[in-house]
Amino acid sequence: MKQIVIISGKGGTGKTSVTASFAALARKSVLADCDVDAADLHLILQPEIKRREVFRSGHEAGIRVSDCTGCGVCEEVCRFDAIGRAEDGATCFVRDMSCEGCGVCVSACPVGAIDFPEREGGEWFISDTRCGPMAHARLTPGGENSGRLVALVREQAVELAKERQADWVLVDGPPGIGCPVIASLTGTDLAVIVTEPTLSGAHDLSRVLDLAQHFHIPVALVVNKYDLNADLAVRLEKEARERGAFLAGRLPYDGAFTEAQRQGLSVVEYGKGAAAEEIKELWKRIREKINHE
Ligand code: SF4
Ligand code: SF4
């Protein structure tokens, strides 16, 4: 079983459309939507949820007013300014959004008036889709630990792939280069970087290449909408090649991306336009590349 993560450095490069198309082309694959802050693979693959679980991310303090004596110790020890005083000044309360879950106030309270339950940071799901089973998640708005949630989604996808003897785990990675991307990248067999020939695309590509190099992950490059700036597309490919990336191919600007998404289909399922044929070729090259390494 091989794991491929599709990443981009930033959103809106066509990464999810490419992932969905690979999912439609790959036989015996399991999908993982690791873009947990702004998941949208489900818009194309319309998963039927089979299992739903709460994602618990750390703890948060909560003061039991009935037991609080208003001594103010917790206010003094909290370094995150997360504790306030009630209007009458008699008791304290925790500002939920500011609590970092360090637990210092819990140990410091002389009368044990502070509870410290686990915080619900979102939900994760196992679903069936027409292209195979999928692990995905939804982070609560303002929720933290998206790196941990990404790692959990990947673990679930790998477990599913083992159970079902799948050949591929296809991971739709989060944008950026932060902790969630690292969690989606580490230990994969190949990172497919989808980029665009724009100045910000060039900047993002360098940063994602740095990241993949740091974790010794082989890279394949796809330049989407290459015809928007063919000269820059060539420069991006040159940089990627010089840094050891495999040039998987280019995709033209194609309105089929938007139309397919509007119809809840991947580009190859939609089947119209030049990009669909190109993506089939891309997948073939990537499959051959990974199977020969
Ligand atoms: S758990 Fe830590 S951050 Fe939260 S209120 Fe207590 S001391 Fe402040
Ligand atoms: S330390 Fe405990 S008793 Fe004192 S104000 Fe805080 S919650 Fe209330």
Image (tube, rainbow, N blue to C red):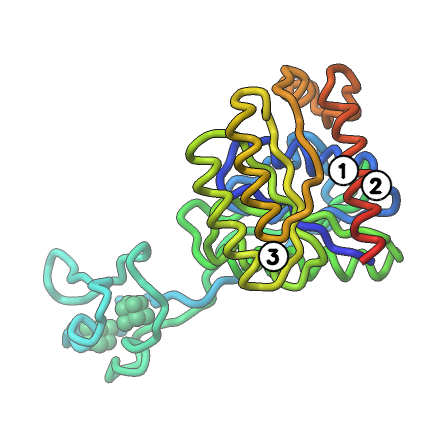
Query: Tag 2, which secondary structure?
Result: loop
Residue 29 percent coordinates (x, y): 82, 47
**What is the C-alpha distance between the residues marked 3 and 1?**
18 Å
Answer with left or right where residue 242 lies relative to residue 142. Answer: right
Q: Quadrant of the C terminus?
A: bottom right
Q: Secondary structure at mark 1?
A: helix
Asked if the residue at tag 1 contacts the one at tag 3, i.e. Cβ–Cβ closer than 8 Å, the answer is no
Query: Is the residue under label 1 in contact with that under label 2 (CB below 8 Å)?
Result: yes
Taking the image as four quarters, which one is ligand 2 found in? bottom left
Residue sitting at x 34%, y 72%: 102
Q: Which residue is mark 3?
A: 185
Q: Is residue 179 above or below residue 281?
A: below
| Residue 91 found in image quarter | bottom left
Q: Which residue occupies 40% across, 71% down?
A: 116
* Circle 2 residue: 26
Q: Which mark is residue 22?
A: 1
Q: Amino acid at mark 1?
A: Phe
Q: CA distance from mark 2 to mark 1?
A: 6 Å
Picture residue at 32% right of the left edge, 54% below the top: 97
